[in-house]
Amino acid sequence: MGKGRRPGSPPCLVRRRLLALAALAPVLAFPLRSRAADLVGHGAMVNAVAVSPDGTRALTGSWDYSAILWDLASASQRSSFHEHAAGVTAVAFLPDGTRGLTGSRDTAIILWDLEGGRPLRRFEGHTGTVAGLAVAPDGRSFASAGWDSVVRVWDPESGALLRTLEGHGSNVNAVAFTPDGGRLVSAGYDFQIRVWDAATGQEKAVLEGHEGSVNGLSLSPDGRLAATASSDETVRLWDLESGALLRTLYGHTGFVTSVAFSPDGTTLLSGGGGDRRVRLWDAATGRPLASFRGHEKPVLAVAFTPDGQSALSAGYDAVVRHWDLSKGDSDRP
């Protein structure tokens, strides 16, 4: 995929070269009955998904200009949000679970009263698509990744722009805080992962090794590791302290759009744009554990529930699929 386009843009998706897969162990495939009820209601591709801190709800953002708050137990809509003037490309919950953020191709970020469906505050400053959102653990700030090549840090209560982080050479796709809130990590089209001091905005490290745009990012619960998903068809694991590349996970056949650590840090979930698969990995060894089939088009976002027993995936087919990770069998693809 070229630097000028992110998975989630409607036109053609350019696939990079296939990487060697000969050393892969067999991958278990979970049958369709391992899905809980899917979330159906968006009218176009779903770009982003987040799960509430208590695990009862999900927030999704779509190219249909809307975001939807879902009840996961009933797979029903609780609220929908329609203030953006273009596709919703990023979503996040605040720690209190009652408020959420949406970012859009219209370059704006909106803070919402989720239950009431009311916009509370609008944040403007990016000059390109807001591709990623991350809320600090204490909820006192949040970060946004922009296709204007910068990361911005905001105060959700006052609406103030606290700082702008410059250093990426192209669009920024993803951003995440470490669990202690001390560092901020960002990734983008320049193939790089950048580590920042969250309080000062000082750049601490640049992690390099990907051969394509970095589309997705997740940090381990202990804050020691970063997992990244790339258009070079790999997921990579990094040591945030040393900057070392620890392992490269091969298995996707096509660009990888998204990645998420499980709540206990033992497994990784990744979404494939090229192969339309959701894959589960052992985080300690990089061993593939399972492959989930069900999306008809590229997968754009993945997320675990807080108990680690289920996961959500969203994509071009406009459906959010809800996977029960506690069920499965030994059927193979």
Image (cartoon, rainbow, N blue to C red):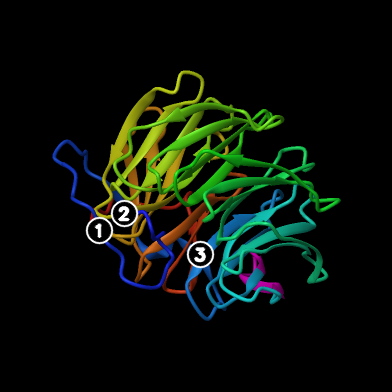
Q: Which residue is mark 1?
A: 15
Disc 3 on helix, strand or loop? strand
Expressed as whole percent of the image width and height from the top left, the position of residue 63 reads 52, 73
Q: Which residues are magenta?
A: 69-80
Specify whether residue 76 is painted magenta.
Answer: yes
Q: Is residue 3 left or right of residue 205?
A: left
Disc 2 on helix, strand or loop? loop
- Is residue 261 in view? no
**Of pointers 1 and 3, the one earlier in the residue sequence:** 1
At label 3, the amino acid type is: Asn
Location of residue 316 (image quadrant)? bottom left
Q: Looking at the image, which is closer to me, 103 or 151?
A: 151
Q: Looking at the image, which is closer to me, 13 or 253?
A: 13
Specify whether residue 164 is painted magenta.
Answer: no
Q: Which residue is mark 3?
A: 47
Q: Which residue is mark 2?
A: 255
Residue situated furthest left in the rendering: 22
Q: CA separation, marks 1 and 3?
A: 19 Å
Q: Looking at the image, which is closer to me, 88 or 48?
A: 88
Near mark 3 (Cα within 10 A), the count class, few <14, some 14-19 or many ≥20, is many
